[in-house]
Image (cartoon, rainbow, N blue to C red):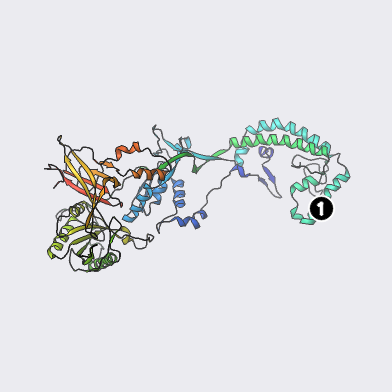
Amino acid sequence: MSRLSKAERLLKTREFANFIKYFDDFSVSTVGNLWADTMGTAEQDKVYVVQTTTKVIQRCLLMTTDPGDLVLDPTCGSGTTAYVAEQWGRRWITMDTSRVALSLARQRLMTARFDYFELRPLNDDDRRRNPDGPWLKNGDGAPKTLDCETVPHVTLKSIAQNTALDAIFVRHQPVLDEKLKALNAVVAKVGKDARQKLAAKLAAKQKAEGKKAITEADRRRWLLPPANRDPKVKLTVDAGLNGWYEWEVPFDVDLDWPQDLQSALTDYRAAWRAKMDEVNAAIAANADNEELVDKPRVRKNVVRVSGPFTMEAVMPAELGLDEDSPIGGASGDLDGFDAADAPQNAEAFLDRMLRLLKQDGVRFPDNKTASFVRLGPLGDQFLHAEGEWIDKEGNTRGVAISVGPEFGPVTAWQVEHALTYAARRRVYEDLVIAGFSFDAEAQALIQDDPNPQVRCHLAHIRPDVNMGGLLKDTPNAQLFTVFGSPRMHLDNNPDGMFTVRLEGVDIYNPVENTIQATNVDKVAAWFVDSDYDGRTFCITQAFFPDKSAWEKLAKALKAVVDESAFEALSGTVSLPFAAGAHKRVAVKVIDPRGNEVMRVMRLDGLTGGYGA
């Protein structure tokens, strides 16, 4: 208590002695359970109807995890959790059943730019809080964490137990006593007229502005002792002392004071300030420092992008009808889907797809849309509609439509039967197979276009067609877009190795009845799986021929990108590879519209060119 009093950190009220706490003692405020700063305008940045505000996720993540920890979000949505985890140096896993959500999250992460945060070694508090944490590493192998700003947190306890203050009090107190003695000697000589003049200033202010306008500073300046003390109040000191006690000394002078009194007070306050500067410095040095986990130190002129991540799909095991399922279940009948509703659901889905197809047509990569003159339902298992569209010469071309399942990919089995049925009717010149996704064999079969009498087109249905109103509506929706076919050559080298040479992407335009050949330099990216198993595409080689993309990257990063550093990534011929166990190579190409197109080629018995 004595240290608190000498450090002038006690304030006496009528009933209590209170602790004086300054703003600089702890210059930040704690976050309570009411997060008012996450409402209002913060919600306007949403691009997904059920998207959570970034600040909410950020605050939850910073409260519960350390840098390097693993964050799991089982409901990905627009990827806000993964985005925030990436921003704050956390590892993450996110998942969703919607293709729309995963596409949004992937795009959001791949185009994100973050500040580059400084790192620091771990301290004892870090290890005690999270002894088994993975933490972060920046090349030397030593665990690190974000180097955040800190602020001192002065408490009553830290002052009361600060023994360094005692030496300061001992050194400065004799000087202050001498200065106070000299000040009181001068104030005792102030005449009656001067005292009355100062007291009149206090009375005038009270009359003009009211009693509540009188401050403690006013009383100290204008009521010189002993008039500054109320004789009715019981004091533990002499109330008639014709001088100030140290807790009564004014902080500033009055211009109506005698000059020698002004000088004496200035000398006293200079000595007092020297003492308090040392006291405050000792208090701050002994205070605990609180780390501001939401304010890491940023390295200027460095931009950070998302680290590498993969997108994985959980595919069910392929089982025959005579095999036991590896998935156990409860005994007895389980509640399931009512089969009686299945035809109605399928019919409603087909009606909606055909209505949208007739309304929007099919968009091709040159931004030309093939609109239907006529389109009506067709009661067939594999051909669901038929109609007509017109080429640029005004010739009418018959077209058949086959729509893939509402949930699941279009398979090669559906493509084969749709082509067979369309060719048998001899009235269709084009076949459009529309679906949300296509397995590799279906893509390869459509791209091979095996029937010369019927041109086959793969039309990708935009995923959010099945999402109702979850995504914001945009103009030029492009609900049905046609994929292209990679134009490439597979070479069998004399040493038994294989190479793939990409030449571009061919896309058929039924409006003009022409093949549009896109040069390889306009291909955004292409990837090779040198041993494709027919189910999972595993990238073994990656190339980015479109060199203008580096300019876009430099613009996005607001930096200069060294093109020579990426020269090896812009090739159009793959590295040599040997035939794998599956004897197949798959090539996936990102066409100029951003669509993924894939071609599968066999390696067994190959003498050159495309595989069988």
In the depicted view, which residue is nearer to us: 577 or 194?
A: 577
Determine whether 240 is above or below 208 in the image.
above
| Mark 1 closeness class: few <14, some 14–19, many ≥20 residues within 10 Å | some
Determine whether 458 is above or below 168 in the image.
below
Name of the residue lying farthest toward the front: 393
Residue 34 visible to the viewer:
no
In the depicted view, which residue is nearer to us: 440 or 526?
A: 526
Judged left or right of residue 368, residue 257 is right
Quadrant location of the N terminus in the rendered image: top right
Judged left or right of residue 259, residue 287 is left
Give SS at disc 1.
helix
* Residue 107 in the image, given as x and y percentages of width and height: 36, 50
* Residue 340 in the image, given as x and y percentages of width and height: 23, 69
In the depicted view, which residue is nearer to us: 537 or 69?
A: 537
Residue at (29%, 40%) from the top-left corner?
Answer: 570
* Residue 512 in the image, given as x and y percentages of width and height: 24, 59
Question: Tag count in the figure?
Answer: 1
Residue 603 visible to the viewer:
yes
Q: Check disc 1 and give the amino acid type.
A: Ala
Determine whether 198 is above or below 568 in the image.
below
Q: Mark 1 points at which residue?
A: 203
* Residue 230 in the image, given as x and y percentages of width and height: 80, 48
